[in-house]
Image (cartoon, helix red, strand yellow):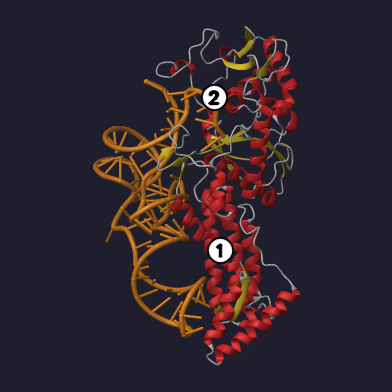
Amino acid sequence: MKLYNTLTRQTETFQPQDGNILGMYVCGPTVYDHIHIGNVRPLIVFDTLRRYFEGFKGWNVIHVQNITDIDDKLINKSIESGETVEEIARVYTDSFFELLKGLGVLQPTHTPKATEHVAGMIELIQGLEKAGFAYEQDGDVYFRVDRFEGYGKLSGRRLDDQEAGARIEASSQKENPFDFTLWKSAKPGEPKWDSPWGEGRPGWHTECVVLSHQYLGNHRDIHAGGHDLVFPHHENEIAQAEALSGEPFFRFWLHNGLLSLGGQKMSKSLGNFDYAKNVLAKYDPETVRYFYLSRHYRKPLDYSEEGLQAAQTAVTRLRTMLTDVESELRTATGTYGNVGSAFVASLSEFRSRYIEAMDEDLNTVAAIGVLQELVSATNRYRAESTAEDRMALLDAVALLKELGEPLGLFSTGAVRESGLEDGLMTLLIELRKQLREKKEFTLADQIRDQLADLGVTLKDTAQGTIWSLS
RNA sequence: GGCGGCGUAGCCAAGUGGUAAGGCAAGGGACUGCAAAUCCCUGACUCACCGGUUCGAAUCCGGUCGCCGCCUCCA
């Protein structure tokens, strides 16, 4: 399949380096607050990529997502709230995992915490210092960007061009304003670890380098995150990782476009942002995923209630076909028939168009279009086919579920099967049918209404009455 | 100042050289006791604008206008 690689600025053919084992590192949250609707995009996008790799490519994905649990923002929050950094980290780490579940995001293979790998980071920094890529100033250690030839290759920046209009924090400590912190000395009361440079804590970029190597080994295929991480975060990771080894850190760098609200950048200071948990309180996970995946992942996405509403209607249309067909076929005794066989044969077309779309830099928008067309074709077939050709619909349902899997659609809300339920519903539907034939509509409607209160939906179709659980 | 993205029907949005997917909304029709669902029909002589290349461009090149992001913590 093809993926756009930020490092080369090209769409390239992707294959795991080592057979069918694929290592993927996705930058995780800093757990100082609940994650917001912007943070959700990479979670959904790269979860979809992972599911597609596993389901359609047969690759074994090692998915690593770090938890940054030591950082200035955590310390600031601790000072404000009086809670310890550990307490704050625990609360928002829990919140994060709860949200993953709520979004139907597969649990990453590894979710290491930064604080559990400080020793490895110290080792890395020592190595850099020894080789002249880092220097200490009063207990702080900085990376010397001038020493690393490839600095700027990911973001396409030349240091000389950056200085003119950029807002660069002046620091007398640094040899070059772009030198970045590898180790930060601790102020009184701050969380700290012993190190060759005194007590302190690691800088932000170091953890991803250490964790990548530790959990992926040589399977460093894909490193992903939001577009805002290209510079400086990922640029600095590459500098640290490649300065010593001289070999490429990751082969593919993937970046999702950012979210906007009302066409404006989302920002806490402007007040135009929303917590992800608030969205999940209003919309089901399939709707949320459908919304995020209906725009190509590299483009900016404008968040809106209208967009969520449209997604909800659209995803309901897909789901309705599934539940209706499953209801219809609950008691069906049809066969495939000639017409049905022809319909089944036509289904492979949808599957190959879907794969073609997903293979082209994860074009979920086109893939969703294929799903919609599949449902249209199936509904048409439902309307036109006769009883002996009904069984073909099962193939369409199976295909829709298969294609929806990477997108995270239709995994929940499947029709539950129960012999007793079936029997009781058949009885009620038969009774109601007799009432309707006698024009006893009040009673017939009462049955339907009261069943609705119990969560059972009845639909009177040309093929008879079908039922489903909501 | 440097780097980058975007502008496609009322709205959302694929398509990046071969004659405009899909969804939402809207209108008409079919089905129907009602409801729900579904089906059929109606949409851009056109892809911000101007010029060029080409047999052919939304797609390539040049220019103009408008919007946005990164360069500072950030998914």
Q: Secondary structure at mark 1?
A: helix
Q: Which residue is mark 1?
A: A318
Q: Which residue is mark 2?
A: A232
Q: Residue at x 61, y 20 (%)?
A: A239
The image quadrant that residue A409 belongs to is: bottom right
Q: Residue at x 58, y 41 (%)?
A: A42
Residue type highlighted by circle 1: Leu
Q: Residues within 10 Å of mark 1 (few under 14, many from 20)?
A: many
Q: Residues within 10 Å of mark 2 (few under 14, many from 20)?
A: some
What percent of the width, then of the height, locates residue A10?
A: 53, 36
In the displayed structure image, the side of residue A117 where residue A160 appears, left or right: left
Q: Nearer the viewer, residue A311 or A300?
A: A311
What percent of the width, then of the height, locates residue A53?
A: 67, 47
What percent of the width, then of the height, locates residue B13?
A: 45, 50
Q: Are marks 2 and 1 in contact (CB under 8 Å)?
A: no
Chain containing mark 2: A
Q: Residue at x 44, y 16 (%)?
A: A163
Q: Which mark is residue A271?
A: none
Q: Earlier in the sequence, mark 2 or mark 1?
A: 2
Indicate whether A435 appears above or below A44: below
